[in-house]
Structure formats: C-alpha cells, structure tokens
Image (cartoon, rainbow, N blue to C red):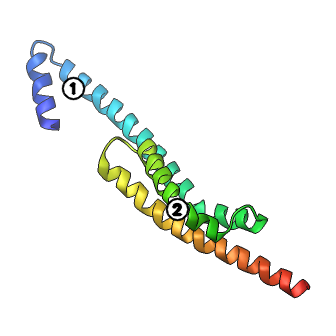
Amino acid sequence: AFGLTRLILRLRDRDHPGAPETALAAQQERTGRFSRAVLRFHMLAFGVMFELPVLAFFVARVGLIDHRFLLRHSGYAVVLLALLAAVLTPPDFISQLLLMAPLLLLYAISIGAAYAARYRMNRSERAAK
C-alpha cells in the first residue's frame, strides 16, 4: 500500500518535482499522529481494566458486594464487558476479543478477590465475638 501510494502521488504530480515527497510526508505525519493517539487510548483502556480486581476487593471489603453477587450477575457482566470492549477498541473483531478476553479473566479474578475480602472480614468479625 505504501509503494502504491507513492507511485500514485508521483504520477499525479509529475510536473511538480517537490510535491510528491511533500504530500507523502504530510500523509505519513497524519498517519503517525493517528497511530500514536490510538496507541495511547489502548494503553489507557488496558491499564484501567487491570484495576478491576483491586476495585472489587475494596468494594467487597466495604460490604457493597460479595462473590455470590458477582457470580449471580456474571451474565450481565459478560454483556457489559463485551459492550465496553466494543466501545474502547477500533471496529474490528480481533481488537475487541483481545480486550474482552483479559476483561473476562480479570472479572474471574475479581470474584476471587471479593471472596478473599469478605472471608477476611468475616474472620475478623468472628474473632471479635
């Protein structure tokens, strides 16, 4: 594709010797800016998703959820995670799967974290009695 673009630019601007390189450089700059923006957005999305187990641990520690709640609502979580992956990624199926698979794994880890948080809380409550 890169070579074809260069050939088309050269054929189009035959009578302007500096134009093809200038147009190609401008196109490469725009492509580079777009790629950097997409990469930053993906890095942010992947970074935020790894906070899911930590969030589940602290929310369970406060007592708002427990592992049974997360298990009971796992169907809704799968749909929500699929929608989140679709929104945060470009519109291709592979990118969505690459984001959704770790999200599902992290959801499972979150269930374990919620169990550990409630277990520790229950153990300390039993010791206080």
Residue 48 on image: x %, y %: 56, 54
Figure quadrant of the N terminus: top left
Taking 125 as reference, is 37 left or right? left
For label 2, the crowd category at 10 Å Cα-Cα, with few meaning under 14, some 14 to 19 and many 20 or more, is: some
Residue 118 on image: x %, y %: 72, 74
Tell me where residue 125 sits by quadrant: bottom right
| Residue at which label 2 appears | 74
| Residue at which label 1 appears | 21
> In percent of the image, x 45 and y 46: which residue is there?
83
Of tags 2 and 1, the one toward the viewer is 2
CA gap between label 2 and label 1 equals 54 Å
Q: Earlier in the sequence, mark 2 or mark 1?
A: 1
Residue type, label 2: Ser
- Pick whichever, 53 or 125, lies toward us: 125
- Pick whichever, 15 or 102, lies toward us: 102
> In percent of the image, x 37 and y 57: which residue is there?
98
Taking 108 as reference, is 35 left or right? left
Secondary-structure class at tag 2: helix
> In percent of the image, x 29 and y 33: which residue is there?
28
- Pick whichever, 129 or 38, lies toward us: 129
> In percent of the image, x 90 and y 84: which residue is there?
128
- Residue furthest to the top in view is 15
Residue type, label 1: Glu
